[in-house]
Structure formats: C-alpha cells, structure tokens
Image (tube, rainbow, N blue to C red):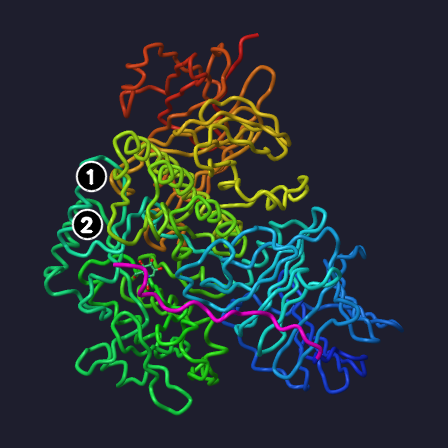
Amino acid sequence: MTTTRYGGVPAAITVRERSGWQSLGNITAHRTEDDALIIECGEARVRLSVEREDMIRVRLAPRGKFRRDFSWAVQPDAVTRVPFGLEEHDEHLEMVTDQIRVRIARRPCRISFHTNEGDFIAADDASKGMAWDGPEIRCWKALGAGDHFFGFGEKGPPLDKRNGAIVNWNHDAAEHEPFTDPLYQTHPFVIVLSRGRAHGLFFDNTYRSFFDLGKTSRTAWSFGADGGELDYYFIPGPTPTEVVRRYGRLVGTTPLPPMWALGYQQCRWSYESAKRAQRIAKEFRRRKIPCDTIYLDIDYMDGFRCFTWDPKRFAKPSALLTSLARQGFKTIVIIDPGIKAERGYAVFESGAAGDHFCRDADGHVYVGKVWPGESVYPDYTRESTRYWWGDLYKKLIADGVTGFWNDMNEPADFTHGDGTIPLTVRFDNEGEPTDHREAHNVYGMQMARATFEGMLRLRRGERPFVLTRAGYAGVQRYAAVWTGDNASTWDHLRMSLPMLLSMSVSGVSFCGADVGGFRAYPTPEQYTRWLQLGIFYPLCRTHTAGGAEQDPWSFGKRHERINRSVIELRYAMLPYLYSEMQYTTKSGAPLLRPVFLDFPEMKDVHKLEHEFLFGRQLYVAPVVHEGAKERKFRLPPGEWYGFDDGARRTGDAEHKIAVGLETIPMFARAGAVIPMRRPVQFVDDKPLNELILSVYPGRGRGCFYNDDGRTYDYQKGRFLLDEYETTSEQDATVLKLARRTGRDAFAPKAYLVKFNGVLKPPAAVELTGRKLAECKDARRFEQLGGANRSDGAWRYDKKSRVLWVRLKRFTPGDALAVIRKA
Ligand code: MIG
C-alpha cells in the first residue's frame, strides 16, 4: 500500500483581513433577565451570565436575536447560573461575583475582566471589541506584551502560539508536517499566560474558526468564525491548573479508561490476515515483550465494508479473536464513517431504510468516495442515527472485538480537492437542520460518541475504548485521540510533544502519536528514542503503513533488548499511570503536562516544549535529537532526584547530562512516592500482588489508586485510594500511609518499598514503632515473600543507594521510618 491514494491537500485556508467589520456601539439600555445581564447597543444584544465555577459566558446577537442555546461541548450540568451583583456607574456597568468583576464600558460597549480585588485580567480591544460582518463574527482582545497562548487542542509546534495564527477546520491531514494547519481536530480553547498568571477562554462555535494571536497586530489578538454565534466563556485562573480544572468542569474530563488500554499497543496498516495477526501476537509472547492490544486496520474488512470481515483472510474471526484473547491480547478494529453505497449490503440497506445518511441541498443522499469506493455518510448529529450506528457494533463485539478505532471522521472524502464533503450537505443538528459548515467540526466527535454509547449499551458495565482521529472540544468524554499520519522523522518525533501537550491542556488527556512514525520508516535509533518518549504518551501505540516491519524487535538484537526494557518500564509504571489517570478524571489536570502548567512563574517557561511533567511526580527530558551524546534541560523549581540513581539535582537550574542509547532522563520530585509493579506481559497477566513504592528523599507525597480496572463499579465505592506522605528530618525519613478511601479489597497483598538515594546504611527501620529485621542476603531477601514473612524486613544496597523494605501490611496510619545513624 502506498500513500498516494490519500485525499487531496486542503485548499489554502487563510484568515481574511478586511474592513467590513461592524463593532459594537454604545450601550442604549440594559436589564437583567433569567439571571443574565442583557445589554442593548441599538439593535445588537449582548448577554452576560455567570456560570458555575465563576466562568463568565458572553454571547452576542448582532441583530438582536440569540440562536438556540445549544452546545455539543458544554456539559449540561456545568452551566448553572450563579447570581451576581450589578453596579451601575456613569461610564460603565459592573457585574460582581465572589471571584470576578466584569466591567462593561458604556461608550462604546467593551468588556474587561478583573479579579474581585480589582486587579486587571483581560479586556476587549478598545477600538474593535466584538464585531460582525454578515454571518461572520469576531472578537478582538487587548494583547499584552507578556501574553503567551496555549491550548487549541491538536496543533503543531510551537507550544506557545504567540505571534501566530491558527484555523480550525477538521482535516484529513495525511501529509502534514510540523507547521501544517489545520489538522484533524477543533478545540477553540486558549489559556493566556501573562507573567505567571493565567486565564482561559472557550469559544463555543463549531463553524470554521480561527485565532489570531498577534500575527496581524501588535496590540490585539482575536478569535472568530465564519458563522454561528459569538459565544464564549471567560475562565478565571489565576493558575493554569485552575483554568484547566474549570474548563474540564465545562466540557468534561477524560473518563477512566479500562486499565489494559494503558498497556503497550501494536498497530500497522495492516495485519491483513488472521495468520499475520497470529504471528505478531506469538512474536510478542515468544520474545517476552509486553503488549496488550493488536489493531486490525481496514484490510480486515470485506472490500472496505464496515462491520464485515474478509471471508478469506479472516475466515473465522471469532476463533482468531478467542485465540488472541487467550494469549492476553485485546483486539481493536478500525471503523470508518463512509458506508459503501451498495444495494444488498446490510449496513447500507438499514441506514437507507432509517434515513440515516446525509443528503445534499437538493435532497439526494450525498455520495462521496472513500476506501470502499462510492460511499454515503451517516448523520451523527441526529440522535436516532447515533443509536442505529452504535448498535451496528453488536456483531463485532460478539466476535470478540474489545475496542474500536474511528478513522476518516473529519469526514474525509476523496472526491474533492479539499478532502471533505461539500459544504452544502445537510445535517439534522439535533433537530435544528443546518449544513456542513456548522456540522463539519463536530462530525468526528459525534461519530465517536455514537460508538462509545453503543459500546456502553452492548457491553453493559464495561468501560468502552474508542480511539478517534477527528474531534471537537469535549471529544475526550468519548474517545482517546491519536495525532494521525505523522512521519518517521526527528522533526515529527519532536513535534509530537508540543502537539500532545497542547491537547493535554485542552482536556484531551488520553492521547498519543504513532510511535516510530506512520509514513516511511524509522532508523533503529529513531525507533528506540521514539519508544522512550512514547511510553509517556498516555496512549502508547506503534503504528506504521507500508511494507517494512516496525515492531519492537525489527531493529536488531541490541535495539530489541533496549526496546523491551523500555516497554517494561511502561508496565512497571502502570500503577502510577493508572493512579494519575484517575486523578485526571477528577481534576482535569492531564497526565502529560507542559512545564508551564505547574510552574507558570518559571523564567521563559513558554519556551519549554521538549520536556514535560508526567503526572504529579515526574519530570522527563527525553532525548529527541539524532546521535545525541548529551541532554541539556532546565529543571523546574524545587528539589529533584534522578529516577534511576536517586541523585539529587538542584531545581530552577540548567543541567547537562551524558546520555547513552538506553538513557531516559527522568527525575522525581522531592519526597515523591511512585507506585509501581514488576512488569508483566499484559495488564491482566498477573494480579497486582506486590506493590512497589518508590520513594525519593525529601518532603512530598504520592497516591495509589486501584479498582477492578474495567467496570464502573468504582462509582459505587469499589475502589481504593491510598495517599502517602513523606517527611525527612535530621534523624529519619518517614513514609506514612496518611489516608485510605474506598475498600481494602483493592489493596495490594504485599509491599516492596524502595527508598532511593539513601547515602548510608540506616541505624534501624521501624514500622509504626516496631523494629524490622535486617536481611543482609540479597537472594534471601528476594525470596522473602507472601505469607512466610513476619512484619517485614529490610536490606540496604550500597551500590545503588537503595534501601529496600518488604512489608506484608501497610495500613492507614502506619509509618515506615528509616532511622539514620547519629
Ligand atoms: O486514508 O486505515 O490516519 O492511521 O492506518 C488513510 C488506513 C486511512 C488513515 C489513518 C491511519 C490508517 C489509515 N487511514
């Protein structure tokens, strides 16, 4: 298969700069209505309301009539009107809440946001403010010298979009390069960071939209769209994490995935026969390289007909899937939206009978061209169509498919040069018919939703796994996202970081790029480096197209050994990954975090995009250059310790370390407690009997979350959340299990505590006042397991500076003390 069969390159999309804009004039009247402030400026109306979390929603109706109050992104329970006070001054009105003051200048009508103490946060551009031109709408904001812009979901580098501009129009960007825009997703969400303080803005509009972040003006930044309403949420900070948390409340956070989905995933275009899929599975197990999933790309289908199997190459799908399942593999198959327009094909027939396919303006069902040839497109913006679509998965699920991969859902269409279906195509739009201009950017998200909801119905009680390419703000509620067709180059390896970091701060926590690159082939070094980065992608999947092998063992013996140990590290970190993922679902704070998120005040932090924080405890500066012999990086403020050697590093300082092919520069926060396990071949391979708690010197914390890993029973209290605290005094380091929530049933059966960076053998080790025995013999210590152990024992390893402690029990309130020699 070659890459020449892709759809076309997009027509150049540029933001028009012209002078037909009509800005808001003077305020002529105002009133409060349904907990909102309505402002009249001649014919135009502005509606301001305070939503939960003190977010301010601003809407503009140039001709006085607001559109239907409807959103694909905003969670219904996120918007509950909060009452506000109104102050009327000569020159302005002021809305006042607990946290913010919204000042609305009267002549002309311009909005600015201030803290409750009156400190300035952000303001409309004084000359232009909110404006319209025919159906187009736009809002100009004042641009500060120190403003930096983050977010926007899936966008290429740089991480900070200051002085740039972006466009949102979901696109099958098959040949994309680092500066290609638009890509596959639309997230009109921005975090503005100004001198360490942050606020956010979510522009809830599904038309083609754009942000100009100082590209055409030095004094204003702006956002707007081709149509729809100027409808945005101002999101107060002042920390970036606060903005991200509030935005998560608004559009929803990433739900807890099934635990196996955090394992390593293997994919290619394609494992085109049952035989080949079997072979790949066997190789993983034979070579003892951990892996949880095998993907089947479009060639498993019968002539690219969705929901079918090729009768020859996949003659007995359920036998294949059962066999893979027995070896510990979950099988995930691709499903595209384009349905072959063919009489007699059951999906086409039932879709036509139910009137589920999009029609063009002339009333005919629109027929485009994708993999199956002439194809029709389900209208996922209609509830009954989503339901019909969800039920189509029944047979594949019965065959044993565990997850679904939704591709081509921008939607792609090979018929036209711009790669998508015509703008005239009609959509139900949840009961308020519209055309493709408004529906385009939500098409993929609603497809993923239909898939997710179908899986929920069909696999009662099981958490779905859906992977989608296209999406709109809030897509994370339904699916993980991968970044589409990248290439096997160092540029693409590097760019995956700003892309995934941008997605992560935009709510899409469960994301990943194709490890090794999709187009072309990586060199052995490149693949290993990519894997060393990829194990920190929340979604860790190798994928490629074409003939050459791109498996962890495809690059020679030495690389195979390194690649195995890299994947093993991912599995060793699983308890941490899962615990941090659970934190994401609650807090909205992503797993993969740009440095600015936690350290907004760090000097020049907006430039840091090739290093990141992984969860709350780790900092990673991956090696991203060919032939690198050293890695330079700047550690954030605080104290840090080498993940492997426990060596202390000063924070807020530049460092340079030598790197070999096996080096992954990783550092833990002071006092970090990182829950780990011994690597397994797949997530459900062995129960987590022994939890490893990797503890670093200093004062800090950590947590361990656990549940059944696959159902929603955790919502009924069937989970465990242990919170640890570490303290370090002159005479002792103490690890305390400070709090336990949930059920003991999910607690580990045994503990292996690893105190890193212990420079001298301890005088004693005590568990809540009782001395533990020392075990000098390494082999015996290893064998001290399970029931034949008393309270525990310890062993100090001078060479690695690790103090190991084995414990049978670690219960709430327990404190494990390492007592230093006087
Ligand atoms: O037109 O299904 O991004 O991951 O392997 C190409 C074949 C269609 C594009 C996806 C890629 C997938 C490929 N698909």
Give the farthest residue toward the bottom: 362
Q: Is residue 36 shown above or below 768?
A: below
Classify residue 11 as left or right of residue 215.
left
Residue 376 in the image: x percent, y percent? Answer: 31, 79
- Element type at marker 1? helix
- Element type at marker 2? helix
Residue 428, magenta (yes or no)? no
Amino acid on which disc 1 is placed: Arg
On the image, numbered disc 2 is attached to which residue?
A: 325
Q: Is residue 597 shown above or below 770?
A: below
Mark 1 residue crowding within 10 angstroms, few (<14) / some (14–19) / many (20+): some
Q: Is residue 297 shown above or below 32?
A: above
Residue 362 tag number: none
Residue at (28, 75) in percent of width and height: 339
Amino acid on which disc 2 is placed: Ala
Classify residue 459 as left or right of residue 151.
left
Q: First in sequence: mark 2 or mark 1?
A: 1
Residue 285 tag number: 1
Mark 2 residue crowding within 10 angstroms, few (<14) / some (14–19) / many (20+): some
The magenta segment is 1-19
Quadrant containing the C terminus is: top right
